[in-house]
Every structure is written in C-alpha cells, then in structure tokens.
Image (tube, helix red, strand yellow):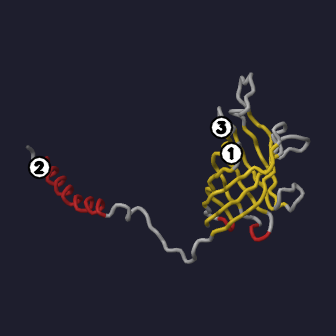
Amino acid sequence: MSKKYVVVVMMMLIMCVMLLTPIQSLKLKAGTSWGKSFPRKNQETETNLQFYFHDTISGKNPSAIKVAEPVGNTKPSFTQFGSIWMADDPLTETSDPKSKLVGRAQGIYASSGQQELGLLMSLSYSFVDGPYNGSTFALVGKNSVMNPVREMPVVGGTGLFRMARGYAIAKTHWFDMTSGDAIVGYNVTLVH
C-alpha cells in the first residue's frame, strides 16, 4: 500500500471519530436544534362571531354561480357530484336578507359526495363592520349540508384574526329544495 493511501485512510478515520461526538449529541438534542419557541407577550384572544350566510344560486342576481360540472354528465344526480360553484355571499347580522351587512364569504365550494349532499368549502369570510372591519378568516373543510348542524375547521386569518384557528358551527335556517337557495346561521369560535 502506498504512503498516500495510508495517509488518506487515516485522515478519514480521524474525521469520522471527530464527527461521531457531534452526531451523537444531535441525537440527544432532537427537536431543539431545528425549532424555537418564543413566549408570547399577550395571551391569545378567543372571539365568538354569530352571523347569517345567504347563498343565492337562483334569480337575476345570484351570489353563487356554477362554474364547472362533470364532463359527459348525462344523468343529473341529486348531489351534483363534481360540480363547482364560485361564491360571493353576503353575511348579515340576522336571518333577514335586508338586515345589516357585516361581511362577505368569497371563494369556492364543490359537490364532493356521490351518495350524500356534501360540499368541500374553501371560503374567505371578510368583515366590513365594527372592530372586525378588514379582518378575515379562512374556512376549508367538508360541509354535510343535509345535517341539521355541522362543524367545519377555521384554518387561518388576517387582520385582527391573524393566525386564527378554530371552528364554525353551521345550522341551516332556511333551504329551498327547488332553487337551492339557502340561509345558514353561523356560530364561529376563533383563537388568535
């Protein structure tokens, strides 16, 4: 064996021994070297919101319109599986559509159930009234619309609701089976 080869092998062994200690210490400190936690100056805030969501898909001025449906769909189903709607629905203080506007729900929802009427909701709830003016929260999840009460996750927010998490309880107040129009009461709990 040449002297160069012996020197290279010896150097590699020395490096392995030198690196062994730091590698073992990384194993002992798993979870502390790749992230940090910081104490917050203020405690988190919990906010409870109650409002009504008006989803109108009929008439001359609908607040939600169908933008896609399955290709080759020759037989319409009750669930409208595969159909997608774009929404800009008003949010009001009471169930009366003429009551005070507090915000809008904007985004998409899609029929995701083959056997049940279930929607995949992806909406941003933007507020235009009071201290919440300019703040939003995002709701993404399944809405089993035929259940009298359903729960959906809140996954984020902006403004006063920055980094929000929480849940929305939705309860159908009124639903027209012929037109598909609905008024839904929302009770939302946000932690931010």
What's the residue type where badge 3 is placed?
Ser
Identify the residue shown where x is 66% and y is 50%: 150
Q: Do the residues labelled 3 and 1 touch (CB within 8 Å)?
A: no
Question: Which comes sooner in the sequence, label 1 or label 2?
Answer: 2
**Quadrant into which the N terminus falls:** top left
Which residue corresponds to mark 1?
147
Q: Is residue 83 left or right of residue 56?
A: left
* Residue pointed to by mark 3: 112
- Mark 3 crowdedness (10 Å alpha carbons): few <14, some 14-19, many ≥20: many
Among the two numbered marks 3 and 1 on one chain, the one whose residue lies closer to the N terminus: 3
Determine the residue located farthest toward the right in the rendered image: 60
Q: Which SS class for mark 2?
A: helix
Q: Which of pointers 1 and 2 indicates the residue nearer the eye? A: 1
Mark pair 3, 1: CA separation: 15 Å
Which quadrant of the figure has residue 23? Answer: bottom left
Q: Which amino acid does label 1 sit on?
A: Asn
Question: Residue 153: image x %, image y %?
Answer: 62, 54
Q: Of the numbered discs in the image, which one, if any, rests on residue 176? A: none
Residue with the mark numbered 2: 6
* Mark 1 in CB contact with mark 2 (< 8 angstroms): no
Q: Which amino acid does label 2 sit on?
A: Val
Name which residue lies at 14% across and 53% down.
10
In this rendered view, identify the residue nearer to me: 114 or 105.
Answer: 114
Q: Distance between the residues labelled 3 and 2?
A: 67 Å
Q: How far apart are marks 1 and 2 (CA)?
A: 76 Å
Q: Nearer the viewer, mark 3 or mark 1?
A: 1
> Residue 48: where, in percent of width, then height?
69, 66
